[in-house]
Image: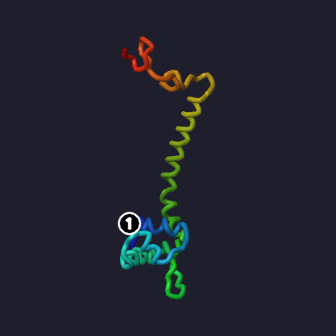
Amino acid sequence: MATTFEVLAEPTRRRILDLLLERPRSVGELVDELRLSQPGTSKHLRVLRDSGFVRVRQDAQRRWYEIRPEPLAEVDAWLAPYRRLWEHHLDALERHLDAMAEPGADAGADSGLDQGPDTGSDGDPGGGS
């Protein structure tokens, strides 16, 4: 059986999960959305089902697939330290931006913002004659 990350490494399977995130879908709907053959779509659905990412519900002649969020907890747990890393960087960026916006700081003076077009030394826009 494939690992969670091997299952999610395949772009088509990620696309199927994206579609199922919106709502349960039949195989036919997934075939139409993915523009894959029915056997190709079914192959990906089988991998997702065997790994626990989706469940199937039979309704007469149709099979409805829906997402199961539990396997994504493994991915979330793996991402947690990286999320903390980014939160730290984003917090530092926020502090930097807050410091730039403090009263008394002339943010636009040295940055070239709000200074209008370059008029050159003779007052002619563009600096030419």
**Pointer 1: residues within 10 angstroms few (<14), some, or many (20+)?**
few
- Front-lying residue, 73 or 19: 19
In the picture as drawn, the residue positioned furthest to the front comes out as: 129
The colour scheme used to paint the residues is: rainbow
Count of number-bearing discs: 1
In the picture as drawn, the residue positioned furthest to the bottom comes out as: 60
- Front-lying residue, 106 or 112: 112
Disc 1 residue type?
Glu
Instruction: Give above or below for 17 relative to 46.
Output: above
Where's the C terminus, which quadrant? top left
In the picture as drawn, the residue positioned furthest to the top comes out as: 122
Residue at figure coordinates x 52%, y 55% from the top left = 80
Q: Is mark 1 on a helix, strand or loop?
A: loop
Where's the N terminus, which quadrant? bottom left
The image shows residue 71 at horizontal and vertical percentages of 50, 69
For label 1, the residue is 10
Residue 99 relative to residue 42: left or right: right
The image shows residue 107 at horizontal and vertical percentages of 54, 25
Residue 60 relative to residue 122: left or right: right
Residue at figure coordinates x 53%, y 65% from the top left = 73
The image shows residue 61 at horizontal and vertical percentages of 50, 87
Instruction: Give above or below for 106 relative to 7.
Output: above
Residue at figure coordinates x 54%, y 73% from the top left = 24
Q: Which quadrant of the view contains residue 4?
A: bottom left
Residue at figure coordinates x 50%, y 26% from the top left = 113
The image shows residue 65 at horizontal and vertical percentages of 50, 76
- Front-lying residue, 11 or 36: 36
